């Protein structure tokens, strides 16, 4: 339950303003961009193995689980695998869909 933003207010940007980039302009988390570099979502790091992903209306859209190769497996909120984040070796990630198409960048 500590990784669920519906239960744990510390990982819910609707309640915790320090992780809400709409309010906290010093938000230190990562942002997800499309391949056209349009800002799409942001990441809240729950712990060293788990991330929650939110859109800018503060809807929890998906989550990620750390993998052995310095990335994250991504799942929708129904627990379906939808893609992965792979390290870009420069403090960010490249996003791939479940067919391994490169669809975005994370910085």
Image: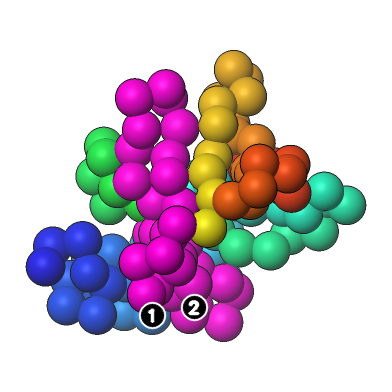
Give the residue at mark 1. 14
Q: Which one is nearer the viewer's eye here, 58 or 22? A: 58
Q: Is residue 48 above or below residue 18?
A: above
Quick one: quadrant of the N terminus? bottom left
Residue 93: x, y in percent?
59, 34
Magenta region, mostly helix, strand or loop? strand
Residue 73 as seen in the image, left or right of residue 98: left
Where, by quadrant of the figure, is residue 90 drawn?
A: top right
Residue 8 as seen in the image, left or right of residue 70: left
* Residues shaded magenta: 52-81
Give the residue at mark 2. 58
Residue 71: in magenta span: yes
Residue 44: x, y in percent?
40, 55
Disc 1 element = loop
- Which numbered disc, 1 or 2, marks the residue that appears first in the sequence? 1
Residue 78: x, y in percent?
37, 75
Q: Can residue 45 be seen in this view?
A: no
């Amino acid at each position: 339950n500590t990784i669920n933003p519906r239960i744990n207010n510390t990982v819910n940007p609707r309640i915790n303003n320090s992780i809400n980039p709409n309010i906290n302009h010093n938000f230190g988390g990562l942002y997800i961009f499309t391949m056209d570099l349009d800002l799409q979502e942001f990441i809240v790091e729950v712990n060293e193995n788990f991330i929650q992903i939110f859109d800018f209306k503060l809807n929890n859209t998906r989550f990620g689980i750390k993998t052995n190769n310095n990335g994250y497996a991504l799942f929708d909120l129904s627990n379906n695998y939808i893609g992965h984040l792979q390290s870009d070796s420069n403090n960010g990630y490249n996003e791939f869909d479940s067919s391994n198409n490169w669809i975005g960048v994370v910085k």
